[in-house]
């Protein structure tokens, strides 16, 4: 999919962002607005029944009478996108006609417009073998368009995929509890610990971008494949039922492991195929979270 087609689709997203914005800030993600999601408002005189843990001892000592701290809910949220720009995201199969990276950009744009609709700040961290670009969280349509423009650049992030480094960098970027949305094919190693650390402080959604060929490869005879990141070439005998079964089993096992790791770390998760409509999948996912549904 070329840049003009991506832009054409993206321009329709503000029209569908309203419903998603409500779901984005509802359901399980309400935890963003409680606990650490409150901020100091004022102090007042202590009254019988007040929690002694809320006493402001410095103010109380200064005035010689007990004062307690008052807080209010902080309704402003930061949404941070972590977008994979490694070489594997640029691969595409004829079964879908769309690269993983294109679908990730569409999903990122939809989340960004929904966050803007809800009046929230939006930031982004892009990565390949290193962190390639960082967009500090800010509000406004012009800021969103600058992020989208940056994502549409065709330079890739290199051969490797260092998701762990990107998650660590995202954690340093965010100063208070936020909503982190990861868009990646997760075809990399060494990110589990960083995901756990991030989930301990923030609400995290992992969106795994897949291709129809992941679910099953058709009989295409002797097929030559090349790993875009390692350069390894594989001559795949797709005419054999045993090979096609092993292919499907390997991808199923990888999916099962990915879901288990997300659950263990406390991240919500959803798979988004390059053959699927991103607004439909994400609206169903967030709507299910709001109504108490389970992850896809």
Image (cartoon, rainbow, N blue to C red):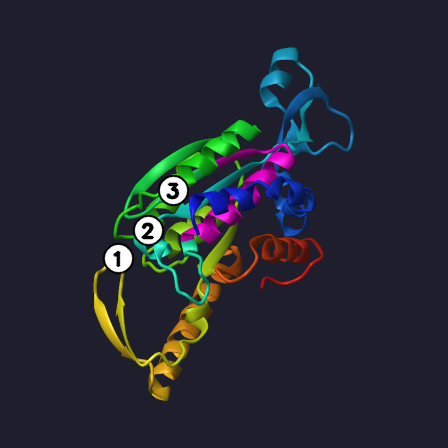
Q: Earlier in the sequence, mark 2 or mark 3?
A: 2
Q: Which residues are magenta?
A: 101-123
Q: Which one is in front, 171 or 187?
A: 187
Ranked by sequence position, the earlier of labels 1 and 3 is 3
The residue where tag 3 is placed is 126
Q: Which numbered circle lies on residue 229?
A: 1
- The residue closer to the viewer here, 37 or 25, is 25
Estimate the spatial distance between the alpha carbons at disc 1 and disc 3, rounded to whole Å.
Answer: 17 Å
- As for residue 122 lying within the magenta part, the answer is yes
Q: Residue 242: x and y, percent?
A: 35, 87
Q: Is residue 121 above or below residue 98?
A: above
Which type of secondary structure does the marked residue at label 2 adopt? loop
The residue that disc 2 covers is 86
Which residue is depicted at the point 41% across and 36% down? 150
| Label 2–label 1 contact, CB within 8 A | yes
Of residues 99 and 187, which is closer to you in this image?
Answer: 99
Task: Locate the C terminus by quadrant.
Answer: bottom right
How packed mark 1 is, by other alpha carbons closer than 10 Å (few <14, some 14-19, many 20 or more), is: some
Measure the alpha-carbon separation of dots 2 and 1.
Answer: 8 Å
Where's residue 81, x and y in %? 47, 43
SS at mark 3?
strand
Please indicate, yes or no, whether residue 196 appears anywhere in the rendered image.
no
């Amino acid at each position: 999919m070329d840049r003009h087609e991506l832009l054409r689709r993206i321009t329709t997203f503000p029209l569908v962002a309203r419903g998603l914005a409500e779901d984005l800030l509802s359901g399980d993600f309400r935890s963003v607005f409680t606990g650490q999601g409150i901020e100091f408002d004022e102090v007042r005189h202590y009254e019988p029944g007040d929690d002694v843990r809320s006493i402001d001892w410095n103010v109380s000592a200064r005035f010689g009478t007990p004062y307690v701290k008052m807080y209010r809910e902080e309704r402003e949220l930061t949404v941070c996108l972590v977008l994979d720009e490694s070489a594997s995201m640029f691969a595409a199969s004829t079964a879908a006609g769309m690269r993983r990276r294109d679908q990730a950009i569409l999903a990122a744009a939809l989340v960004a417009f929904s966050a803007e609709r809800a009046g929230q700040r939006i930031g982004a961290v892009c990565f390949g073998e290193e962190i390639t670009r960082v967009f500090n969280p800010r509000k406004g349509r012009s800021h969103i368009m600058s992020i989208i423009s940056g994502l549409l650049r065709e330079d890739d992030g290199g051969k490797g995929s260092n998701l762990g480094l990107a998650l660590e960098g995202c954690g340093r970027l965010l100063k208070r509890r936020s909503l982190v949305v990861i868009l990646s094919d997760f075809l990399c190693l060494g990110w589990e610990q960083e995901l756990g650390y991030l989930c301990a402080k923030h609400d995290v959604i992992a969106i795994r971008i897949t291709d129809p060929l992941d679910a099953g490869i058709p009989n295409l005879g002797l097929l030559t494949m090349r790993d875009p990141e390692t350069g390894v070439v594989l001559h795949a005998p797709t005419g054999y039922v045993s090979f096609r079964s092993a292919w499907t089993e390997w991808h199923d096992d990888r999916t099962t492991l990915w879901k288990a790791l997300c659950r263990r770390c406390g991240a919500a998760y959803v798979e988004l195929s390059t053959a699927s409509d991103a607004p439909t999948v994400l609206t169903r996912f967030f709507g299910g979270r709001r109504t108490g549904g389970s992850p896809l």
